[in-house]
């Protein structure tokens, strides 16, 4: 089997390099999208590593904006253009880290071929806090001075947006592992259905449900597994998950998840060293 990782990154080149080296095998290619707002020169040491490819079509990424989806699609397109027959593609951020050895990760996917591992809770009756995203106008993807005021005015004057009636919306976490065939299907829909892409571009946090929704409403639905294989701690109740430290070591070393987020090597590198030692 052959594998590809797509990593979305914007800072911490040293931590990103550690992640890339940890994931590297002779069966694995690693594609990295560096936010346009970041200085690409800071990451060039990583570009020299074997089987590493920087995504050439870079996006200026903003939190909660469709630009995150587009950056992911750009990475998928480059993988597809390579002509390499990847069996699985895993989407990570630069602050993620594997909890298992490369051998264990590869063995897991060998034992679970053709699956799409992602969170896909129905927005209509389970993940209901996401419902306003489908009806309101958001200009997150089009930042400019005064965009917040214009956004409020649009939502005051215009009728609520009508989501495409032929789609059942599902999602939650943006991180997933899918097959190349599934990625190709997603790219095809988003590059050919301009009306749908436009709808998503005015939606806040579309990265948390675009990919799941497209597969859920496709012939690939039966291949979906409602598990994104990630250990993520939301116990602090913030807009972002908890930054994991040595205080979380016991949970991280005993979970059956393959990956975890998020980490900060600058404030606690010991937890990454502990994970590495556990996987030797």
Image (cartoon, rainbow, N blue to C red):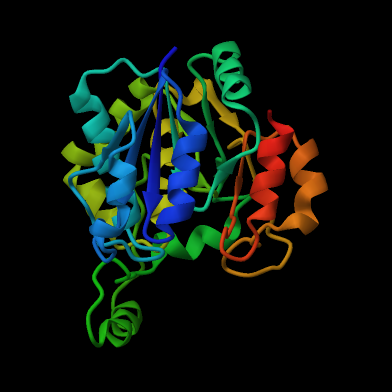
Quarter residue 137 falls in: bottom left
The x and y percentages for residue 278 are 74, 34
Asked whether, in this view, residue 220 is left or right of residue 247, the answer is left
Determine if residue 224 is in view: yes
The x and y percentages for residue 109 are 55, 19
Asked whether, in this view, residue 77 is left or right of residue 128, the answer is left
The x and y percentages for residue 150 are 27, 84
> Quick one: 28 or 93, which is closer to the camera?
28
Instruction: Count every numbered label the image shows and give the total.
Output: 0
| Residue sitting at x 34%, y 70% | 138
| Residue sitting at x 57%, y 44% | 97
Quarter of the image with the C terminus in it: top right
> Quick one: 217 or 232, which is closer to the camera?
232
152 vs 4: above or below: below
| Residue sitting at x 77%, y 49% | 249
Asked whether, in this view, residue 61 is left or right of residue 173, the answer is left
Determine if residue 169 is in view: no
Quarter of the image with the N terminus in it: top left
The x and y percentages for residue 275 are 69, 41
| Residue sitting at x 32%, y 28% | 51
């Amino acid at each position: 089997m052959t594998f590809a990782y797509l990593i979305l990154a914007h800072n911490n080149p040293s931590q990103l390099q550690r992640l890339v080296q940890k994931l590297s095998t002779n069966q694995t290619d690693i594609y990295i999208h560096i936010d346009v707002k970041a200085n690409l020169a800071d990451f060039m040491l990583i570009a020299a590593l074997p089987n590493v490819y920087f995504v050439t079509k870079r996006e200026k990424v903003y939190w909660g904006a469709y630009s995150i989806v587009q950056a992911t699609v750009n990475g998928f397109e480059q993988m597809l253009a390579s002509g390499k027959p990847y069996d699985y593609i895993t989407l990570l951020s630069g602050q993620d880290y594997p909890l298992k050895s490369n051998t264990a990760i590869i063995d897991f996917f060998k034992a679970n071929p053709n699956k799409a591992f992602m969170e896909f809770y129905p927005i209509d009756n389970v993940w209901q806090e996401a419902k306003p995203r489908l009806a309101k106008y958001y200009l997150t993807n089009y930042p400019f001075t005064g965009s917040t005021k214009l956004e409020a005015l649009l939502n005051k004057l215009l009728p609520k947006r009508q989501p495409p009636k032929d789609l059942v919306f599902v999602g939650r976490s943006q991180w997933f592992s899918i097959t190349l065939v599934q990625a190709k299907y997603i790219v095809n829909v988003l590059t050919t259905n301009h009306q749908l892409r436009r709808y998503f571009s005015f939606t806040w946090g579309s990265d948390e449900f675009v990919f799941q929704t497209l597969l859920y409403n496709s012939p690939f639905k039966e291949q979906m597994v409602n598990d994104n294989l990630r250990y993520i701690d939301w116990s602090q109740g913030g807009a972002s998950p908890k930054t994991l430290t040595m205080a979380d070591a016991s949970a991280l070393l005993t979970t059956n998840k393959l990956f975890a987020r998020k980490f900060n090597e600058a404030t606690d590198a010991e937890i990454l060293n502990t994970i590495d030692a556990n996987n030797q």
